[in-house]
Amino acid sequence: MKTLLDRTDLFNGKVIEEITLLPEQGYSNENYRFEVGNKNYLLRKFKLADRDRVLEYKIQTMAYERGLAAKPLLLHSDESFMVCEFAEGEHRTQLQREELNLLTETLKILHSLSIDNPPLKLEELFKDVNDEVKKSFEIIERYPKEIVLCHNDPNPKNCLFSSKNLTLIDWEFASMNDRYFDLAAVSIEFELGQIDEAYMLAWYFGREGWEKEKLEAYKVIYKELCKQWFKDNLHVNDFA
């Protein structure tokens, strides 16, 4: 990995300390931590080629400017890697109310952003569509589209909590999408009960109210997409 960094002028000849493979890895990238001048950085070596890394870099830059992401520093398309500042924090699988508030506020800020890119076409991501998924798409069509900039993968491994702050990482799936997709993902991934889910929605929508049926439909779609993705990509790194 040091050889990759030496081929760039990102650090202008500064000493790059030992590069360490992080103990927890994602499915699409190899993640390395390294130090330059007493500051920590992250190198993400891409495993999969079916991602729009230019779009990812652009979105992460926008998110960083709003305090939602680590600062991206370099995208090297030829060598298939990205460098950004290292985000400190802890993962949470169970959320206290304060943490749920923080995550909800973070999504509200993200969802206030927009990028000139076509919305994600969820239907095209499915190889097989069962009756439950078909019904869910039919339900969604009854409601207005609420297209915003979504992370699309706000699971516990992609949320780093620190003191009164939350950093979202791994922006490779981010795109324009319906806001309910992110909300459904949070409910599923953090296993929110009915009370906590209602609390999140009330915090997010306030007096506007929300569409429970629409949320439930997106929860079905999100769960089925996850099942399909894990099935298709299990061979990539055997859940490393």
Image (cartoon, grey):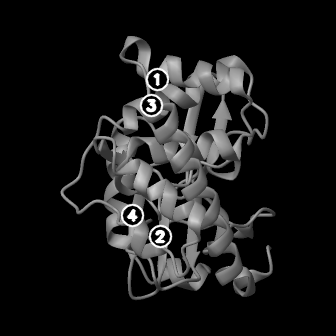
What amino acid type should be assigned to the residue bearing mark 3? Glu
Nearer-N-terminus badge (1/4) = 4
The tag earlier along the polypeptide, 3 or 1, is 1
In the rendered structure, are the residues bearing label 3 and label 2 in contact, judged by CB atoms less than 8 Å apart? no
Please tell me which of labels 3 and 2 falls first in the chain.
2
Residue 12 screen position, x and y as percent: 41, 68
| Distance CA(mark 1)–CA(mark 2) | 32 Å
Mark sitting earlier along the chain (4/3): 4
| Mark 1 vs 2: CB contact within 8 A | no
Q: Secondary structure at mark 3?
A: loop
The residue located at (45%, 84%) in the rendering is 7
Give the residue type that dot 4 points to: Glu
Residue 204: which numbered mark, if any? 1
Query: Of the numbered discs in the image, which one, if any, rests on residue 56?
Result: 4
Q: Which of the labelled discs sits on residue 82, or is there none?
A: 2
Name the residue carrying label 3.
Answer: 211
